Image (cartoon, grey):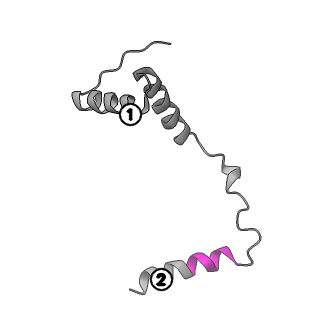
Amino acid sequence: MRTIVDLTEEQVGALARLCEEQKISRAEAVRRAVDRLTGESAAVPKETGFGLWKHKRLDGRKHVDRLRAEWGAR
């Protein structure tokens, strides 16, 4: 797919320098930028963290209370 993107002069200059350094086309640089942006912002499934501390022997409520007590101790 082709698209039109408006860039500032500073962005065009920075992009040109990057492309020169990496010996890639502007299109390739933009594709890489889009890949990086969409990869970083991809939602992490909630299952990733579920049960993360199950091997620890602690009471969650007591743990939270302990942490909150630290905030008030200053």
Which residue does the image show at 29% across and 25% down from the upper left? 7
Displayed quadrant of residue 74: bottom left
Q: Is residue 44 above or below residue 36?
A: below
Displayed quadrant of residue 6: top left
The secondary structure that dominates the magenta segment is: helix
Residue indicated by mark 1:
21
What is the x, y in percent for residue 18?
Answer: 37, 33
Q: Which amino acid does the dot numbered 1 rest on?
A: Glu
What is the x, y in percent for residue 65?
Answer: 56, 79
Q: Secondary structure at mark 1?
A: helix
Q: For the residues marked 2 and 1, what is the alpha-carbon distance in whole angstroms?
A: 49 Å
Circle nearer the N terminus (2, 1): 1
Examine the structure image and report whether residue 3 is included in the region drawn in magenta.
no
User: Which stretch appears magenta?
Assistant: 58-65
Q: Secondary structure at mark 2?
A: helix
Residue found farthest to the right = 55
Residue found farthest to the top = 2
Examine the structure image and report whether residue 61 is included in the region drawn in magenta.
yes
Q: Mark 1: give few (<14), some (14-19) or many (20+) Cα within 10 Å.
A: few
| The one of 44 and 71 positioned closer to us in this rendering | 44
Q: Which amino acid does the dot numbered 2 rest on?
A: Glu
- Judged left or right of residue 23, residue 54 is right
Residue indicated by mark 2:
70
